[in-house]
Amino acid sequence: MFTLTDEQRQFQESLQRLLRDGYDFDRRRAIAASEAGWSREYWEQLAGLGVLALTLPEAHDGFGGGAVDTFLVMEACGRALLLEPYLATVVMGAGLVARAGSEAQRAAILPAVAAGTRQLAVAVYEPGRRYALDPLVTTAQPLESGGWSLSGAKTHVLNGGSADALIVSARTPRGVSLLRVDAAAGGVQRESYAMYDGQRAATIRFDAVRIGADALLGEEGAAAEAIEYAVDAAIAAVCAEAVGAMSALLETTGQYLKTRKQFGVPIGSFQVLQHRMADMLLATEQARSMAQLAASRLADATREERRRIVSAAKVKVSEAARFVGQEAVQLHGGIGVTDELPASHYFRRLTMIEVAFGDVDHHLGALGALLFD
Amino acid sequence: MELRNKVVAGEHLTKEEYLRWHRLLFERGWIAPSWPRAFGGCEWSAVRQHIFEEECGLAGAPGIMPFGIRMVAPVIMKFGSAAQQQRFLPRILSGEDWWCQGYSEPGAGSDLASLRTRAERRGGHYLVNGQKTWTTLAHYADWIFCLVRTAREGRPQEGISFLLIDMRSPGVTVRPIIMLDGGHEVNEVWLENVEVPVANLVGEENKGWTYAKYLLGHERTGNAGTGFCRRWLGELKALARLQAGSDGRPLADDWRFRDRITRLEIELMALEVMNLRVLKLEEERHAPGPEASLLKIMGSDLQQALTELTMRALGHDGARAPQAATGRYFNFRKASIYAGSNEIQRNIIARHILGF
Ligand SMILES: Cc1cc2nc3c(=O)[nH]c(=O)nc-3n(C[C@H](O)[C@H](O)[C@H](O)COP(=O)(O)OP(=O)(O)OC[C@H]3O[C@@H](n4cnc5c(N)ncnc54)[C@H](O)[C@@H]3O)c2cc1C
């Protein structure tokens, strides 16, 4: 679908090497069990390699890469089951600042992201509202002094507990707006939690948080499109991540079938298991096609085209993720349902991707509406 | 009542909690529905046992661990000595002894007959060495029934014996295996120079495979689990009425999700009838047959479909750990692996029903 330049291929190789060598299973397990759930040392290595800067604009210490570069990074993250908050900080946070922010805001935030000294989180989902993207309970009132007073609650905020700055969607007098909030500001109450894949998210409450006038990202009341784009970008990214995870899971399962012996032969010699592996490969490759389509069209498609492609990709990838995850566990037998081998860790991450940013039913509904309404 | 709440919430129960329910049933005389009256059981018909189990599952009663009542006890009754029957059966009934099943080994899962744990006869006892694995709730157990190798000649099935081993014997070590939902229910059991009195051999030496197969037949029949499936389905419907979709209306109003639940309702209906048909067959034949494999596959498929849909009902709210529905979804991937994987069940169906 897309062909990589020599430069991209080299980058892909060095990134995969870094993740393979520096991020083995036991190291990852220790990081997942730590308080923050990610490693600052590792984050700095990613910054050092230029991974964090790759897709940021050249004007702000970035390399100006696009969605295909994001695909490469996320695919490698999926293979390594990376815990560090690349998606939240770079894809979603920095992506949104680059797209909707003013020149001053970009200059204040993006170089620090590229250098690895600043982490971001995007807060759009609200408690009890499933995948609804329009803010309802989170509101920002203009203050006489010129700033804003923000109140409400957000949940499923990826990296919400560790981020230095939060980008929050809120209802303002003119509509839906985005506000940059210092995570340490008074009235911000963060409750970080672990998800089943070891990654962290947070529920965040805002109680009359006072923020400055310069905190508004883009125009007041005109943020709905930017939010939608940020979520679509995140979906394209997790689709690439899922493809990486599925490919690695296929490899490790294939390896297991070749070495595990029962009845005096490798279990991979049973044709029924070979066919299951073949079906898993089909699902993975179909998912890869759709993930590549989403990545390659993200930036240049019309809004409606993009929405169609991204929802279709999310459905296809989520279904493949579930199928491949479940089957890989099954083919491992008892060891598959333990914490001991990578298989169940891939399965858990794939399951979290399945329910993130809209599950199958959500995107079936969204795509169906675009096709028929 | 609080026990019921814990079961319904999908929490792991402690040994004491399992035993509380066990003793309650024991006091009512209902702990062993299938046992003959002579041994203190109810001697109910298969259909009556089934109804009883359905009701218990539906009501959210804790499961009665099968290892004593349903697994080792029938073997002791059929193949054990009078002394073994007097010694072990009353303590199984009362709950004084908790049993676990020592069949699987790291190298012997689906291919159980390849097991390597050795038992060597040394005068009045056997000296046992080897490792068992996947031993469910061995960390609660007082006794383990083990398949051990007592001879190397002939077919692998021919050199296996059935031994009862006191978990407190020197040389027995239990190590936890953590599951993918973070729970601890299975273990490794290491046996190093464990001395087991010859009196704890069930039946004859090298005949253990016959007894093991007898037991496996009993294990499979119980696995359709339609009672707790009905409860799970009820909980799922209640959840769908409560859980808001992205448009603010309950999920139950979303035809897409409603259809998914409705399909499972149909699956469950079909399975309930299937269960009764197999019971009837077994009653006529006085023994479990290959049809048990059908129930094992259909039951585990339905359990997995139900836990999956319940997890999906939560949307991304299910991502936050710990979360009963998501934990159960992950945990129940085991249902198509244990008690003979569904691939092995299909092999049995192909061979013994279809005649390939
Ligand atoms: C939660 C849990 C609890 C358990 N509790 C107990 C217990 O208390 N006591 C006990 O003794 N055991 C217990 N077991 C073990 C269980 O019986 C084994 O896991 C099961 O028999 C599978 O063996 P295995 O794990 O070695 O997988 P393997 O036999 O290695 O199988 C791996 C894969 O290969 C497939 N396969 C193997 N052979 C064939 C074939 N011929 N044709 C097609 N496919 C094949 C399997 O279906 C599976 O998908 C438990 C297991 C689990 C998961």
Image (cartoon, grey):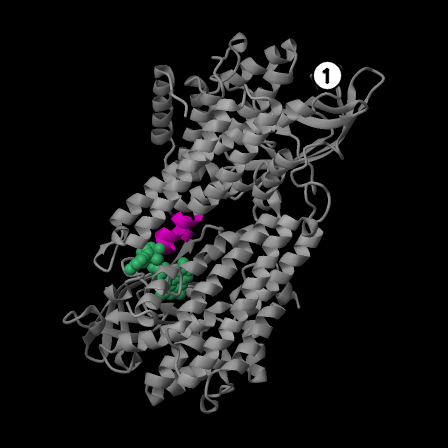
Q: Nearer the viewer, residue B161 or B235?
A: B235
> For residue B268, which quarter of the picture?
bottom right
Q: Nearer the viewer, residue B336 or B91?
A: B336
Q: Quadrant of ligand 1?
A: bottom left
Residue A334: say if magenta: yes
Q: Amino acid at mark 1?
A: Glu
Q: Is residue B102 left or right of residue B329?
A: left
Q: Is residue A54 left or right of residue B306?
A: left
Q: Residue at x 57, y 20 (%)?
A: A94
Q: Position of residue B106 (x, y in %)?
A: 30, 57
Question: Which residue occupies the extreme right position in the image?
Answer: A144
> For residue A195, which quarter of the picture?
top right
Q: Position of residue A260 (x, y in %)?
A: 27, 51
- Per the image, the residue denoted by label 1 is A219
Note whether A147 is above or below B95 in the view shown. Answer: above
| SS label for mark 1 | loop
Question: Which residue occupies the extreme bottom position in the image?
Answer: B38
Q: Position of residue A65 (x, y in %)?
A: 47, 16
Query: What predominant SS class does the magenta segment belong to?
Result: helix
- The answer to whether residue A156 of the structure is visible from this angle is no
How busy is the neighbourhood of tag 1: few (under 14 within 10 Å), some, or many (20 plus)? some
- The answer to whether residue B83 of the structure is visible from this angle is yes
Residue B257: say if magenta: no
Q: Position of residue A145 (x, y in %)?
A: 83, 15
Q: Point out the stretch of residues depicted in magenta.
A: A326-340
Note whether A262 is above or below B103 in the view shown. Answer: above
Quarter of the rendering occupied by the N terminus of chain A: top left
Q: Nearer the viewer, residue A47 or B48?
A: B48
